[in-house]
């Protein structure tokens, strides 16, 4: 029981392996099944199981193909369309929510200048409606002047008719469309 069988790699696999490697370099998207078909077209009499065994043994594999992520939305509201070129060129505003210890919600209205990345206003409240958004914007327009464009998501506070009219009256274009 002290002797064990030592398998020997037959020399016939060396030529086959060299041809498989050559084909794998020439056809990088082919797996062992297509390589088996190509070998048979060249006149090799090979079993697919043998090709698969040698394929795994040599560590050959088809490169992973990355799937492209489908873009969501349109490019009209993207940063690449209207990049901020100066101070007060593009502002962005959005809500952030948090909870107090007793579980009640807090809403933060944040207004940013995209060029300087400066926080222009942070309004905190339990509930901030379109009227509150208008009050913050009116204050900022008095203090800093109006921006060229203002960017927001499509939240109900931002697409309200009152805000859209007020921004149009003050000559500020919005980026983003109504749903």
Image: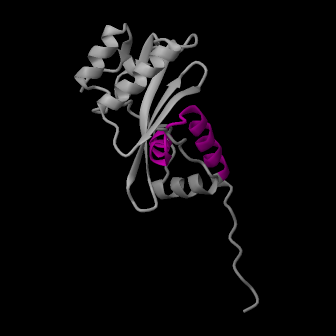
Residue at image location 58% in from the left, 56% down from the top? 56
Name the image quarter holding the C terminus.
Answer: top left
Q: Residue 173 or 48: which is nearer the viewer? A: 173
Q: Residue 61 or 162: which is nearer the viewer? A: 162
Q: What colour scheme governs how the chains and residues are painted in the rendered image of this protein?
A: one colour
Q: Residue 135 or 88: which is nearer the viewer? A: 135
Which image quarter: residue 87?
top right
Q: Taking 98 as reference, is 123 above or below it?
A: above
- Residue 28 highlighted magenta (yes or no): yes
Residue at image location 34% in from the left, 21% down from the top? 176
Q: Taking 177 as reference, is 121 above or below it?
A: below
Position of 2 with respect to 90 (left or right) is right
Q: Is residue 78 visible?
A: no
Q: Position of residue 69 (x, y in %)?
A: 42, 35
Q: Position of residue 150 (x, y in %)?
A: 42, 18
Which residue, as the protein is rendered here, is positioned at the far right? 2
Q: Residue 21 or 14: which is nearer the viewer? A: 21
Q: Position of residue 28 (x, y in %)?
A: 55, 36
Position of 170 with respect to 87 (left or right) is left
Q: Taking 154 as reference, is 35 above or below it?
A: below
Q: Position of residue 102 (x, y in %)?
A: 41, 62
Name the image quarter holding the N terminus.
Answer: bottom right
**Magenta highlight range:** 14-40
How many marks do you count on the picture? Answer: 0
The prevailing secondary structure element of the residues shown in magenta is: helix
Q: Is residue 50 visible?
A: yes
Residue at image location 31% in from the left, 9% down from the top? 169
- Residue 164 highlighted magenta (yes or no): no
């Amino acid at each position: 029981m002290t002797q064990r069988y030592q398998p020997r790699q037959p020399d016939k696999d060396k030529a086959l392996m060299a041809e498989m490697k050559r084909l794998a370099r020439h056809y990088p998207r082919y797996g062992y099944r297509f390589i088996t078909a190509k070998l048979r077209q060249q006149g090799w009499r090979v079993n697919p199981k043998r090709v698969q065994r040698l394929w795994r043994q040599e560590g050959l594999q088809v490169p992973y193909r990355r799937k492209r992520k489908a873009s969501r939305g349109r490019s009209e509201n993207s940063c690449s369309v209207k990049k901020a070129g100066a101070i007060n060129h593009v502002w962005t505003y959005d809500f952030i929510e948090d909870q107090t210890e007793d579980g009640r919600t807090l809403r933060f209205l944040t207004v940013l200048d995209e060029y300087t990345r400066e926080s222009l206003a942070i309004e905190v409240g339990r509930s901030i409606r379109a009227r509150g958004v208008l009050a913050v914007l009116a204050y900022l327009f008095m203090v800093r002047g109006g921006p060229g464009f203002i960017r927001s998501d499509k939240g109900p506070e931002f697409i309200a008719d009152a805000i859209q009219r007020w921004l149009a009256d003050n000559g500020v274009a919005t980026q983003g469309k109504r749903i």
